[in-house]
Amino acid sequence: MNDISIWLAFGAGVASFLTPCIFPLVPAYLAQLTGTTVADGQIQVERRIILSRSLGFILGFTIVFLLIGASSTALGSLFDSRNALIEQLGGIIIVLFGLQMTGLISIKALMTDKKVHRPPKKSTSFAGSVLFGLLFAAGWSPCIGLVLGSILALASTADTMYTGMFMLFIYSMGLGVPFLLVGLLYSKSLNKLKRLNKWLPRIQQISGVIMIALGIMLFTGYFQMLSAYLSRFVPFGI
């Protein structure tokens, strides 16, 4: 795994966090995790509780994403002799996801709501926050599924299962670190977060354009060439 794949995975996680189905709901997630309420633009709980519950939440969805990454890479390894074909198929999938995010196309199958319709009870412990993270990952909404699906397409082309899992770990950190920072820095001033909501659709469109470019590069083989070229100067891999 090289530098460009790591930054792509982390950037995809950040893009998932900034989607309209995640970022505006951060206060609700924090309230659910800490078992408290939002009042006067604040989470009515100490920051140490927010820290522990957020870490449990991140651990929960990271576990699920790691397992999904392992499965995706294992499936890709079954067709190792047709690696070029898998990369091209992955490129096509990423382009479709990117077009969906930009709004240029609308595929109903990609917009099917997969969220858990019966939300878990408010978390009252670290273990409860881990469970909340597990449920969140198992029932992510379509807008995070598009970005995650692109990373899974890349993970399916990884050389080893550990590489694919590491890619999903980096993706989870891209999603989890901003969540943790927002929880710690803005839990007492949640109203400031609303100022950023108007930029979310534009961020999603930009992310879609990046995904389209990535898919084209993967389909044509240019992504692999660029990765190999950059690894000569900044070797980083597992």
Image (cartoon, rainbow, N blue to C red):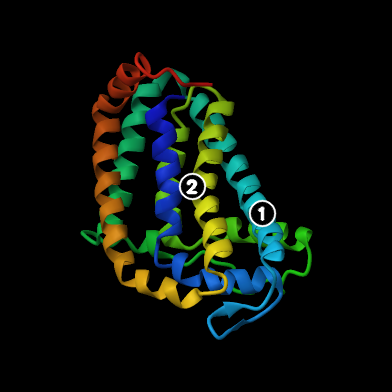
Label count reads 2
Q: Which residue is pictured at 39% across the width and 53% down the height?
A: 15
Q: Which residue is mark 1?
A: 55
Q: Is residue 213 visible?
A: yes
Return the residue nearer the eye: 234 or 131: 234
Q: Which residue is pictured at 71% across the width and 74% down the height?
A: 35
| Residue 193 located left or right of residue 68 | left
* Residue 219 rendering spot, x and y as whole percentages: 27, 31
| Residue 170 located left or right of residue 49 | left
Residue 191, compared with residue 212, is above or below; it is below
* Residue 126 rendering spot, x and y as whole percentages: 76, 59
Q: Is residue 119 visible?
A: no
Q: Amino acid at mark 1?
A: Leu
Q: Which residue is pictured at 79% across the width and 64% down the height?
A: 125
Residue 162, compared with residue 183, is above or below; it is above
**SS of the residue at dot 1?**
helix
- Whether tag 1 and tag 2 are in contact, CB under 8 A, the answer is no
Residue, far bottom: 40
Q: Which residue is mark 2?
A: 174
* Residue 124 rendering spot, x and y as whole percentages: 77, 69
| Residue 107 located left or right of residue 171 | left
* Residue 152 rendering spot, x and y as whole percentages: 46, 40
Q: Which residue is pictured at 24% across the width and 40% down the height?
A: 213
Q: Quadrant of residue 48?
A: bottom right
